[in-house]
Image: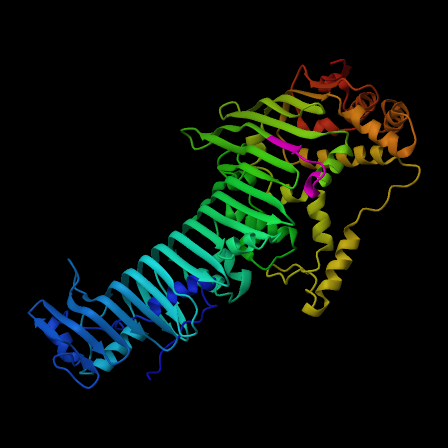
Amino acid sequence: MRNKAKLSRKSLFGTTAAILLLSIATLSPVTAQNGNAPASVAQIIRGYGLERESQYFHFDSKQISADKAVFRGVHFGSDLSAGVFTIEREAGGPRMAFKFENADFSTDDATLKFQSGVFIDNNIAGPSAATTADNFVKLLDDDLHGDASFVGLELGSKDDEPPITFATLAVRNIRNLGEDKWRFDAIDATGMNGKANNFEFRFAALRIHDLNEAAFKLFEDKGGLANFGKASIGLFKIEGFSLNDSRVAVQRRAGSANNFGGFSIGNIEVRSLNGNSLAKFAIENVAASATIADEDFRFKLAEFSLNDLNTRLFRAGFAYAMNDTSDPELEAYMNLPMKSIYTTGPLSSGISAFRFGGLELSGSGAEVKLDDLSYNQTIGANGLITSFNIPPGRFDVNVTDARKTFGTLVKTGLEAVGLTSINASWKMRSTFNQELDKVLIEDTEFKVANFMSLDGSANLDGLWASMAQTSLKDLMRADPEIEKLRKTNPFKTKSKSGETPAVAPPAADREAAINAASAAAQPAPAPPTTPNNRANMQEAMDQVAAMLAIFPQGKMVSLQINLRDMGGLAKIATQEAASGGKRPAEVRQAWRAPFATMMADKSKPVLARFIGHGFGNWLLNGGTMHIEFAPTTPFLLPRLVANNATATELGLKVENRAN
């Protein structure tokens, strides 16, 4: 038997895609060669020894003209047979096309059957020297440099695994680079069906377009994530995927307490991904069901999607958090002004649109629903975002049967905060005026029904100008959790920019290193004389100061915040009192105690003193804590936490109001 090049099943896109590519790789036409002029049909026939029958090559009849050769009842030994085999020029082009109808192809490790198949070979000059029909099949088997398409394809294996079928399959510019390395420009498949380990799967459509070499290596798991920033994918799209257990009917008749009801995805899409951006990512219309211990579960997700992701921004942020200074490009990017990164204005988030919605999870006595968590933006004529919107959304958690496993767990969790269900809602709208460098935040609210709510509005100037003076690294440094992670991260990499990072531990020591880092990252307990709530307030002020420093020209024009108790404080106090043998009033007095003396503590910024005092009273009495900044003259944002700032300068008012 011929020595055939093999495609490793673990080298490309996992089992399914590798089998798909194997079906093409084993049907590979002639390697491209240089030629001065396209070969004629007659030259192809003579060059491959197809002008007459031989011990290996047989046919029932043939019709040969200047531009076409048609063979019927064709057999190439036991390797390939076809009802009709046609050789002719591709429509409107110089390349030669080899067409098969009702064909069977047997290779070393696979069997293929297809209603029709067309191979268009890039080698327009034909074979460089006279050869035989055996070599023609070898060329089909080993060295396609061109296009291939099939209708009604069935791919089987020599180990009696069930076949995989395709309604249609087309591959553009497939090529064998040797050493089990196959490349292509595009794959488009429809109606793919198969079975593996009692599971039946189906793809209505699969499309893979325009992968660069780094993307192939990423999927082949050669070089690991080092290729991620270099990888480019034009399109990866799966439509109408479903997975079902063929044993379900038998299991149910047998009274099994556990079975898999099925899993389906309407659409998975990755479009225009590279190291700098991702045009679109989407997972849509997901559904799954299962029975576990005689309890039925259902899951649905209408959509998880994002558009225009700045992948370089997230790569740089991740590298910074991991102390990875090995990429000079990302190092330089971290030091760019934020205005050069968030190029669409101060409302930019690095993603133009996001949606997570239509979520439903039910079963075993509980249900969770999320109708819409999303945002969208409007781009003005100048390319800047003029509005950023989070439309109204809801999140609900309900117990439908507290006697069942999931219902019991959810009920216990809700009771810890005095609730029987969660009904949360939110909305937000913000706008930007470039001429005034003004950001308005309005119509903003987050609410948990029968618990508490937070709403507010703001008028801020100078944020866009500030972003020209601060870098992405400044933004990252303002997050204490990221800085803590950098200090404890055990996987520091060698810098190319002259810094002196630690050396990454050997693989054998990684678990110990992770455990050590995790222990080091745990916050130290507060001193006995320092109430935790008050310490947390100071920590919050420090974080606010670090964040405000990013906007040195930002100004506060006005701001209002309302924190409204809607029965939540009483519910929590009642639960804590019941578990601690106290009265709810005593619990709320204890909550207030750390803040009772804050107003008199002149060492603290006026913002911390006023908010701490108001927050303590809110914990005690409930109602609404109203925070307002209405300065006569707008002030620079860093003044908010300045020790010498006054309430008059800030226009600060904190009031405790009855609802």
Residue 340 at x, y = what percent?
Answer: 51, 41
> Which residue appears at 19% of the width and 69% of the height?
83
Q: Tell me where residue 516 sits by quadrant.
A: bottom right
Tell me the residue at 29%/60% (across/down): 152
Structure colour scheme: rainbow
Camera-side residue of 591 and 157: 157
In the depicted view, which residue is nearer to us: 72 or 354?
72
For the question of whether residue 383 can be seen, the reply is yes
In percent of width and height, residue 389 lies at 52, 28
State which quadrant residue 31 falls in. Answer: bottom left
**Can you give x and y, in whole percent of width and height, for residue 68 in the image?**
10, 67
In the image, residue 398 lies in the stretch drawn in magenta: yes
Residue 563 sits in quarter? top right
Residue 100 position, x and y percent, is 21, 67
Q: Quadrant of the C terminus?
A: top right
Q: Is residue 161 left or right of residue 389?
A: left
Magenta-span inclusion, residue 164: no
Please state, as top left, top right, bottom left or bottom right, where the N terminus lies in the image.
bottom left
